[in-house]
Image (spheres, rainbow, N blue to C red):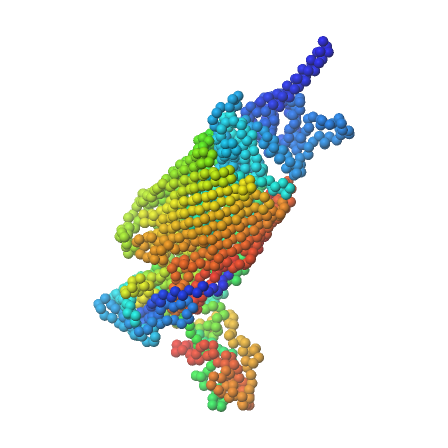
Amino acid sequence: MPKFCRYCLLLCFVLAVGFVEVSAQDKKLISGDFRGMNFEQFIHALESKSNYHFYYNISQFDSFTVNISATNKTLNAILDEAFLHSDFHYSIDQQNNVFVIRRFKIETSLPTDFFARKKLTNDSSKNFVLSDNSDEQEKQNEKIKSALENRLFEIGVKSNTIKPGSATLAGYVRDLKTGEAIIGAAIYIDNPPIGVTTDQFGYYSFTLPRGRHSLKITSVGMKETKRQIILYTDGKLNIDLQEFVASLKVVTVISEKNSNVKGLQMGVERMNIKTIKQVPVVFGEADVLRAVLALPGVTSVGEASTGFNVRGGSADQNLILFNDATIYNPSHFFGFFSAFNPDVVKDVELYKSSIPEKYGGRLASVLDVTTRDGNKKKFSGAGGVGPLTARLTLEGPLVKDKTTFIIGGRTTYSDWLLKTLPNKDYSNSGASFYDANVRISHEINAKNNLYLTGYISNDQFKLNNDTLYRYRNKNANIKWRHSFNNKFYGIFTAGYDGYEYSVSSTANPVNAYKLAFDINQTNARLDFAYAASASHTIDFGVNSIYYQLHPGSFTPVGDKSLVVPDHVQAEQGLESAAYLGDKWTISSKFSLNAGIRYSLFNYLGAHDVYSYVPGQPRTENTIVDTTSYAKNKNIKSYQGPEYRIALRYSISDNASLKLSYNTLRQYIHLLSNTTTISPTDIWKLSDPNIKPQTGEQYSLGYYQNFKSNTIETSIEVYYKTMLNYLDYKSGATLIMNHHIETDVLTTRGKAYGVEVMIKKLSGKLNGWVSYTYSRTLLQQDDPIAGETINKGDYYPANFDKPHNVNFIGNYKINHRFSISLNLVYSTGRPITLPIAIYDLGGSQRVYYSDRNQYRIPDYFRTDLSMNIEGNHKIKKLKHSSWTIGVYNLTARKNPYSIYFTEENGVIKGYKLSIFGTAIPSITYNFKF
Amino acid sequence: MASCKQLYNPPEIRQNPGFLVVDGALHVGADSSVILLSRTRNLDSLSSVPESQAKILVMDQSGQSYPLTEQSIGRYVCSSLNLNYNALYQLKINTIDGREYLSDTFHAIQTPPIDSIVWRQDSVGVSIYVNATGTQNDSRYYRWDYVETWKYQTAFQSLYEYVNGQVVYRAPDNQIYFCWKDFASTDIVIGSTSKLSANVLSKKLVAVVPAGSEKISIKYSINLKQYGISKEAYEYWQNVKKNTEQLGTLFDAQPSQLTGNIHCTTNEAEPVIGFISASTVQQKRIFISNKEVNPWYYQRYYNDCYYTFGDRILITQDQAEEYIGKPGHLWVLIAERGGVYDIVQLFCGDCREHGGVNKPPAFWQN
């Protein structure tokens, strides 16, 4: 039997080898928590749990930390995950030897044609696959991607039979390169057709039927990917997406697939910083607000105005959130720049019709600007130098994969521009601004994350060396996110937001003064999201804002000043709300988002309140009583429910119909008697004499996508009413007024319109074109006002511009060169024109028509910009790009205002343009 | 920021409502009170539309009244009004179309005296400021108007005259080398001390003479009149100012309707333009001569006279009648020697051609 034995042995050996190989690579499962281990500890742990032997050069791994844990996973899976973002490669041979090496991959077996080839044995380098240049890197990434896409992920506690019912899969979607959370990524399956999107942390919670699925994950600007899963029970799956770099040879189609059609939200616009950076701008600085102005339904009074108007709302009816901090003045430098540093902004969401129930306190819209988290993987920076501004941003890990920071700053050197102006009024003037952001994100553990955000912006300008204007935003907040389980998480946020301005003049010591205003709010909120089942996602929470306003102080400056200190009494208020909302997928065709928010406002002491003769115009002469209230005493409460309802009906895979109804309440008002919002306008809380503003909006939209969802089209109509919107009596005094209620009037408003948009967000040519027809009409209906505007008839609001067309197009000529074009057309805004002249006080004067009965000429502007990138070697020390642009290419003198003024006793009409010429700019941007 | 303004003529608007405009103020004591009545007119209409043959009365509460009489068309004057500071008055206007207008009641206000008028020169020009001190009881609101007067010259001094074919020396009171011009303020100048602890007006800017202006080419004078006004009047003028003067900035106030203190009793809905108030007048005059301001780069209006060929020519005696003798002649004789006449264009030799008068006003100090 020796022969037999030999064969037997050989067979045994073969079998054994076969068995070992099978068990090593497929069967032998390893469990353990390896987080925080260095490489050696990790290897020892693996060796102790298996019969593998590792071979490596420790000097290559001295800075490597493992951040994974495994439950019943194969060694391949563990190593794949551990080395996912590194350039380490491993090979396992048939003897359970594991070779780990940097940059190269060891082939553990000879090529099948090895013996067929000759003279190869000496060339040892052929045994390595070089993966150093970028093409190879790209291929490598592709490999990882396809490896991940084809691998089957087993989620939850494995069982032999899959139980019926649903389970919840949760996790984060992140950028492979930077580890940054991806907001708004869509995760969906085709059968049944359900999906979710990631929240502001890149987190998703997806309840779906147990069993095998192919998850599809898409997000704007990222490569589309998929994951094969078997869902046994609730479990976690983190997904990394790769940035999409448009290639000339392969045009990969990307889009926020179907989210326009399938999402429940309507009237929401999302733009990431890439899109924002494509919008050509004045002075070469990417500008969040200018990009927002290119969206349908958003207008502004003029080029130099602070703020914007959404669907007929005034500028103070927008809630502007910057990482959940309320920004009261989002502009720099008379409104020419927005206060957001483009290098730290990640994306922007504008809600115009169905406003999520968690937001409240403003009537028209919520603009949610989110900054990036710092790069989790490595230290990096970005910056730019333009004609007026310079900026620098630094970011990186403080503790790798745990704690990151991002810090950014911007400043201006715009004085030279003012000096070049022909108008002498500006030649002695100076203006400057800066802003700074900081954000620290810390992952305490898998269930707890902490975020700290700080922001400050400061502006000052001096006209004619005399009066100094200054304004400043200050914000800080802390956010703690806790996941209770896969389905349920909560966020606690606490913060402070402040805005202040001051005007001072010291030219004449006798009159030297300082006029100051500030608003401070301390806020706290608790928000919860609960993915109750496959068809219900519930949001609920409470929040509270404590306001303290100093509506004005007028104080002397210096010893010689005779100015009597005057302080308008401070105002206090508490705005609280609780909300509950449910996203309910009723059937594959119908889904409903029903939310309710109940808000309560308390106007608090200490304050003196005037009461007036009932039924008579409020004037100083009709004050009958003054009541003094003690500190923190409730003076007046306003409260009411707000409804947020949105309904979607899918007509087909590519088309849907949505309906929404919203009501909103606003307890804080901006007092502004100028046509555009000026930095020195003040805010006022609702009080016993000034009621909160309320509004409701109905909207209806139809959405259809074409060409495999690469072209999105939408049409939305809306009708909106507003109550208790403030207007002002003729010659109202708003500054240092101790009884502002005698100078304001309440008006009602209605707004309606149609917004049509066609959008192409992928391919070499991308962009959108939109047309908006909208009207905003106001009517002064205060029965005891004592005077009426336009005899109590409806009149157009200052920002009523019926026709608006926006075109934004970007064409990528090649990897390094792209061109963007921006076209804007709108009807001229309404103005009040003089209809007659008279002589008074030694001069001709004009008599004005009813308010806003005429319009200034139409507005049209063309902007062009070119982006030139340096070469695309990934391993370059520094990436740089140039942005060359021309704002107002046709040099059209678009009127900002038309006014009539007396000069030497004669009336003259003038048309004022702000950018009456083409403005070229060149900006250098860099990244390292 | 390259802001630019262009002249703009709006689309033709012809909606002239023809409202009554009451322009003027009542003055206590010997200063005459003048009220100009007119009607609003179309935007493109150049001349004003005075309201003639109206009856204007100042009435007190006891029924006594003082009339203003129409001195010239639309100009109603009362040479002296003895109003009592403690009494309440009303203005009543009856127009020829049968409508009656009545003002709210008002007090006559005692105006604090002007302490001084001071000026300062900077790159903009000469800024003129007023200082005044009132008592705590005086009105805290002020309004000013002023008349500027200045002396200027022309290019060539004409020492001779051609009268009836004879060359004679020009009499001093007939000189045409120096002239005087005046200009009444057109801006609304108001001020307030309501935010100060004392009723002290300190360096309130009232007028600016732009750098290089002809006004201080030789000597300049300003006569400032100060009026105490009520808070309501102050607010009214502030509004007029906002509506018609302080425009063209980035943050313009919205034009607003003006509600004065005069109402139409015949038709309550009819707006009336103007605000009537009564006060004493305080005034003060200062002079600023060219020597006090330095340097004053005055661009002479007659500069071309020295360089333009043909503005100054020599003629013979025979041509004299033709050039400088006939009525409506366009030339001025400046010198004569041996039958050759040295003549210049009127513009270069007669300062009156530039709009002034060749005799100094009574108050003028050389």
Is A246 displayed left or right of B246 in the figure?
right
Q: Position of residue A276 (x, y in %)?
A: 53, 46
Residue sitting at 41 percent across and 50 percent down?
A751
Quadrant hosting residue A786: bottom left
Q: How many marks?
A: 0
Residue A835 shows in this picture: yes
Image quadrant occupied by the N terminus of chain A: top right
Q: Position of residue A84 (x, y in %)?
A: 59, 32
Q: Position of residue B67 (x, y in %)?
A: 27, 72
Quadrant hosting residue A851: bottom left
Is A736 displayed left or right of B92 in the figure?
right
Give above or below for A666 relative to A581.
Answer: below
Image quadrant occupied by the C terminus of chain A: top right
Give above or below for A361 relative to B9.
Answer: above
- Considering every residue shown, the one lying at the far top of the view is A1
Residue sitting at 46 percent across and 65 percent down?
B9
- Considering every residue shown, the one lying at the far right of the view is A119
Residue sitting at 27 percent across and 70 percent down?
B57
Q: Position of residue B155 (x, y in %)?
A: 51, 78
Residue A471 shows in this picture: no
